[in-house]
Image: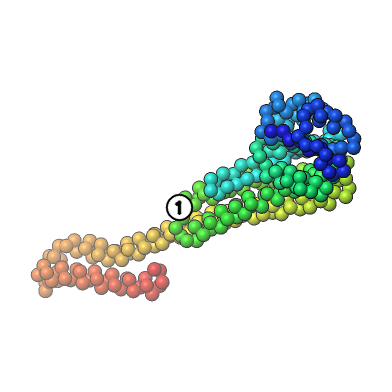
Amino acid sequence: MIRSFVFNNGKIVGQDLDIDSLKLVMFDKGLHVWIDFEHVTADEARPILEGVCNFHPLAIEDCVQPSDRPKVDEYENYLFMVIHAVDFTRATEEFRTTELNIFMGKDFLVTYHDDPLRSITAAMDRVQKNSLAVAKAPDRLAHTILDLLIENYRPVMSELSAEIEDLEQKVLSRKPKNIPSEVLKVKNEVQQLRQIIAPQREVIARFARGEFSLVRAHLVPYYRDLYDHLMRISDAIETYRDSLTSVLQVHLNLQQSEVNKVIKVLTVMATLAMPIFLITSFYGMNFGHYPREMSDPLTAYAWVFGLTAVTTGVLYLFLKRKGWF
């Protein structure tokens, strides 16, 4: 699907134009255009990207081919950006990213993405409701889209935070199941997000520093605000990584504690069993070695069991007094 908007001083004067009309509009310096490509093939997009917009072949190639790293390239009269939106659903436990390619010139903005994006949909809604507020110029419209895209990171961060809290509760409940695998899964999701945010933060930082002449000076503080949002997200990601490491460490410590308890119980049992082994080994149940007055087998048995009980009881009291169990 290819959608287009034509603006004159921030007001919509045209929408969803054909290729010939777009060619005319692109040469009209009093107008600016937003063209959005959603789920189109390269063959469908190239006539506009090449024939209408006259973008560089390398930029077009980067646009139509998936790229897993955000970046911004400066050409003679436009910028080309690769940015990623993220989405995470706890119901399906699916973490995925959607690439958004942006061409920004003085009089045009072109966005290209394979899957629907909430930021693009929300930006279109704002354009149709109040275009003067968000579409006076391409740099302002680009900021609106980026702001909405970064704002949509919040649900993802909330979902990850909720997952970490669930893991913490499972560990503290001492009824954990597959905790290491769950922690590693969430940690992998956090690492994926970190790999996206870090270079994306550097891209926005270039706008925040005012490196590009296409971004007007009064809009630089707004891009700086986007950079601050990404910095906070980046700090939260580092906190999540530390929390997951702590959860795994606590789980391992609790497991070790349980093992130590088992070993302690077995050690006490083995210690308490020592008297019967020593006494029966000494006598060998050969009653000929008992005192003469214990020549009766029943008396001998009573002697062995009594001596064992007394010795075991004394040993039990000694261990209890020492607080070893």
Residue 130 position in % (x across, y down): 79, 48
Residue ID at (38%, 75%): 321
Residue 56 position in % (x across, y down): 80, 28
Q: Quadrant of residue 247?
A: bottom right
Label 1 crowd bin: few (<14), some (14–19), many (20+), radius 10 Å: few
Residue ID at (51%, 59%): 169
Looking at the image, residue 88 lies above or below residue 246: above
Q: Is residue 43 visible?
A: yes
Q: Is residue 284 left or right of residue 150?
A: left
Quick one: which residue is furthest to the left in this view? 296
Residue ID at (41%, 72%): 323
So how many labels did they put on this image? 1
Q: Nearer the viewer, residue 266 or 205?
A: 205
Q: Is residue 234 visible?
A: no
Q: Is residue 227 left or right of residue 188?
A: right
Q: Report the residue marked by disc 1.
A: 177
Residue ID at (85%, 29%): 24
Q: Nearer the viewer, residue 238 or 115?
A: 115
* Quadrant of the snapshot with the C terminus: bottom left
Q: Amino acid at mark 1?
A: Lys
Looking at the image, residue 271 lies above or below residue 252: below
Q: Secondary structure at mark 1?
A: loop
* Quadrant of the snapshot with the N terminus: top right
Residue 293 position in % (x across, y down): 11, 74
